[in-house]
Amino acid sequence: MQTILRRIIQLIFVLAGICIVTFLLVHMVPGDPARVIAGDRASPETIEAIRQRFGLDQPLWQQFMTYAGNVFAGDIGQSMRYKRPVVALIGQYIWPTLFLTGYVVCLAVPPSIALAIASARRPGSLADQLIRFIGIAGMAIPVFWLGIMMSRFFGVGLGWFPVSGYGKTFADHLHHLFLPALSTAIWMVPVLVQSLRAALIEKASADFVVAARAQGAGEREIFWRTVLPNAILPTLNLFGVLVAFLIGGTIIVETVYAVPGLGTLMVNSLLARDYQVVQGLTLMFAVTTVVVTFLVDLLSAAIDPRARV
Amino acid sequence: MNGPLAPLTTADRPLLDIADVSVTFGNTRVLKHVSFQIMPGEIVGIAGESGSGKSTICRAAMGLLPSTADVTGDVHFDGQGLLGLGEAEWTKLRGRHMAMIFQNPASHLDPLRKVGRQIAQPMIRHLALSRSEALGRAVKLLDDVGIRESAMRAKSYPHELSGGMKQRVMIAAAISCAPRLLIADEPTTALDVTVQAKILELLKELNRQRGLAIALISHDLGVLADVCSRIIVMRHGEIVEQGEAGQIIEAPRHPYTRLLVDSQPGKRQFKTGWKQVEDQTPLLQIEDLRVVFPAKRDLIDIVRNRKPAPFAALDGVSLAVATGETVGIVGESGSGKSTLARSIIRQNRPAAGTVKLDGRPIEQFAGGDLLAFRRRVQMVFQNPYDSLNPRMTALEAIAEPIWRHGIAGRREALRQASKLLDMVELPTALGERKPRQLSGGQCQRVGIARALALQPQVLIADEITSALDVTTQAQILELLARLRRERALTLVYISHDLSVVSSFCQRVYVFRSGRIVEQGGAADVLTNPQETYTRELVASLHRLPGQMVERESIEG
Amino acid sequence: MSMEASPASGATKQHAVTLPWSLLVAGSIVGIWIVLALFAPLVAPFDPTAVDIANALKGPSAAHWFGTDQVGRDVLSRVIHGARIDLLMCLAGVLPPLLIGTTVGLLSGYYGGTVDTLLMRLYDLTAAFPFFVLVLAIVGVLGPGLINFFIALAVVGWVTYARLVRAEVMAIRDSEYVQAAQCLGYSDRVVLLRHVLPNAFGPVVAYAVSDAVLVMLAGASFGFLGMGAQPPLAEWGVMISDGSRYIRQAWWICTFPGLAAISLGLGLAFLGDGLGQLRRGQVSA
């Protein structure tokens, strides 16, 4: 209980911090903030209206209070380009991204676990060395390049998969997003494998494993009941970091495959200087990461009695 | 409860028969032609220092060596050959007929599972008990190994138990299936002395009541002499001598055994080189010292507006050390003895009270005074490898204080350092080595030389031998006694080992939970302890027969 | 308690440093790229910006080994010149955060206190943002371009280094050799620079090398997204972005800069891994 309460308090502080950072983000833009928010082609009237609406003539802290109040009320800004609330835009673009992330996790996690186990079973063996090599090499491949190459080969060349868009039905989604999901997964698997492999090898030589062996436990039992649960923990903690990676990865992959998701929205808004959308998306991505990390911590506490004190 | 026990049964067939076993890792031979036997119901001690192979032979017998080990020879358990058994056969044997407990109970328990389940697991596995049945027996076993409120404790996780309790849990799991042989690998080394005595008592009781044969591995000959009927002495992977416990201790045949016996803490007296104290103003004076570590106040405490209770590591300690005196500080872990050392060298800021050198409070020193203080008071640390900067050679480490304090130029400092190296009896060639290329004892000598480089008046030695083998420990003590004489050092010697302290010091302060519970002349405290705690401490010492204090006289 | 290392073996065993083969291979790959970048004008067969519309979109040939792009520029020359930008990105993207982070981490880990608490909160906050998103947002707001990319990296990246160094320093601060140095009366500056920093720096170097991979890939991605290096600058990400529009007719424009990025990335990744192994080997020996 104590831990959970502590984490919740910390969560509130971090969320407040996120608000401050995203608020300051728009204020970093060189020039008149009202003009920046309004965009290049805005008329003086629009700029004045924006100045009024956001209270941009007020002191900074008051502006922040207005912003924080708006965020709390669910208003994270207005897109100048689409003339719509950012929340509505996110609602429209989020589904392909969610689908893609889920797809990536499904494609990446099972092979990661299998490869890590295969590797850690006999450290130093040929299979292990190969997996370790792939693990390090995989991190050095630019995702966007891989995406382009795969779309050229499987999409344009062989015609197996569409090279852009999202499709209409569930099966369509699966078909359309296969290449994007695969490119991201190829990039994610090495990170997962490396972490889980290291944890497995470390725990497999732990003292309590020797003790279990001395008490007559068979190797199979030791692996599934002692080594694996203990090795899952550090990997679980990596998960929060991976979510951050995953979000970064989808931004690029969505751009490459023209998937109408949040990443594409982010990049297009950046290029169009639609700063309120950028601000809103940054806020949303950060909140997502923090919440996922929080959930992972709760899960760790459920597995690990030491984290419950 | 005194003296070694005779074997319960006198069966003629040995329970464990190890014949001509050699173990090789790659090109290194760690065991050479080791042969010995353990009869049913007897307690056999295996003694040896680090690198002697005493743990390796037992792990070989349990089939627990890594697959890179090449084992030759014959191991029989109750007539069954063990070498070359498959995994399935091993699992039927381990935990069922032969069990093992380890040095560090904390790391040998699975942190994610309740201790009750960990004790129950072997019974579910070997005796085909149901889970609830096994859990019921686990609670009973916790009772048997002396854990109170066993039903509640069975639901605890390992991190919620003390070190002694964890070892009891390991023992409970080991004896759960009523094995015939228990291999105990340094089972009490990581524990405080008073806890150690209780665990050994428990092992003896298990032997007596259940006829459990025990192979007790220890570096501490005193422990073995107290518990075992026979002792096997190992060195560099070979057995140098084996025989009845009494013969090994009283009439060792092999020179190494003799050295080992002579090196036992408290066996040799280092009573030279100190000055007799006349009534004079003390050199180092500690008055009502209180050191408090504030508990960390985190967000939750701020929100609830409460202050966590601070922890007082030292609570009103007063003591005095006269010039040329050697004073011992004894205490178990958490007694505050290391905090005292750190306070004397100004590493801890006292919450109340003062430390005075020559009547001047050391907290007030600054600038030149502080540097002068640093030259007068120096310290030698506990962990030989950790106390030296891994990136500096021995010579650099010793020379650094000399030139940094401007006593000599860098080249001259190196020359002086090599003299100091000589003084601590290290060959000059070792000066070019980094700490990881030195042995523990050599590192500790470098640490002493570095501390003496500034020619201090007061030397604080905080557990400087506790990480070393007994023979090395004896050599270091001898060196320190010589230096004390040659350099007229005032020594504050801190240790958990009362017998070492009393063999080396004039006066002793006994610490417990941040307070001094008893003080007096070293011999008095050892022979005639006044306080209950000190008595307990004295009673838990394992002294070899023929040492200066008779155990009976203490207990009587 | 007895030390595990036997006195005999500890004293006689000379420490033999064997370089992992992967470290040698990785080092040479990175070395070759550095040489190519340094002498790019001498090595490259053509001017990387020389437009030759008549020879646009020509496949690999004896004259143009890697072919030509949509305006007839020699892809090989552009790849070689691109190494300058991409290596510079590694350097300018890693060094400032490393220096800032190490300094802050050293001081906050050693002295603790309010600065330290503040640093940890700042870390929590930075870790809350996905790295790529925050850098992207900052660059977007400041305006696309390499300089702003480096600024964003420094703003976001130093915190990781600070945390890494802080953790190392906190462990070393409690070690007995630091206590001994303090007890011997050395000044804080001496203790920090001579005794703490050299022992805390190993993991930082290993991390910095793997961070360089991340930075290079991020830089190329930014170039690809149009947020980093700007055309007509020969940068691998920009080239891939340009080439992706002609991928159906001219696969080579995209492929070769990508392979270049992978080879440099591999080199750096294995260099980091090898250095890490070397360090662990020394620690455990």
Image (cartoon, rainbow, N blue to C red):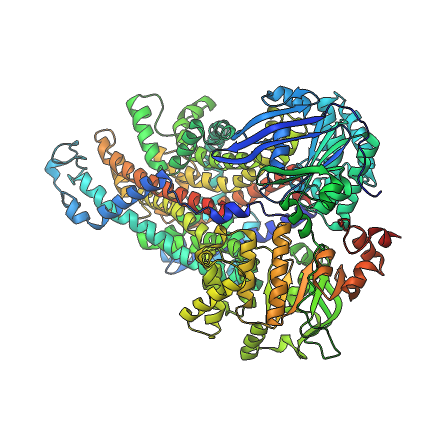
- Residue shown at the point (41%, 45%) measured from the top left: C16
Above or below residue B404? Residue B503 is above
- Residue shown at the point (67%, 73%) measured from the top left: B324
Q: Position of residue A96 (x, y in %)?
A: 45, 32
Q: Position of residue C102 (x, y in %)?
A: 45, 58
Q: Is residue A81 visible?
A: no
Residue A116 placement, left or right of A217: left
Q: Position of residue B2 (x, y in %)?
A: 83, 43
Above or below residue C34? Residue B392 is below
Residue B372 placement, left or right of B548: left
| Name of the residue lying farthest toward the left | C54
Question: How many labels were placed on the picture?
Answer: 0
- Judge by depth and name the residue closer to the eye, B120 or B271: B271
- Judge by depth and name the residue closer to the eye, C161 or C170: C170
- Judge by depth and name the residue closer to the eye, A79 or C38: C38
Q: Quadrant of the N terminus of chain B?
A: top right
- Judge by depth and name the residue closer to the eye, C246 or B208: B208
- Residue shown at the point (82%, 40%) measured from the top left: B146
Q: Is residue A123 visible?
A: yes
Where residue C151 sits, quadrant-wise, is bottom left
Above or below residue B426? Residue A123 is above
Where residue B224 sits, quadrant-wise, is top right
Q: Position of residue A239 (x, y in %)?
A: 53, 39
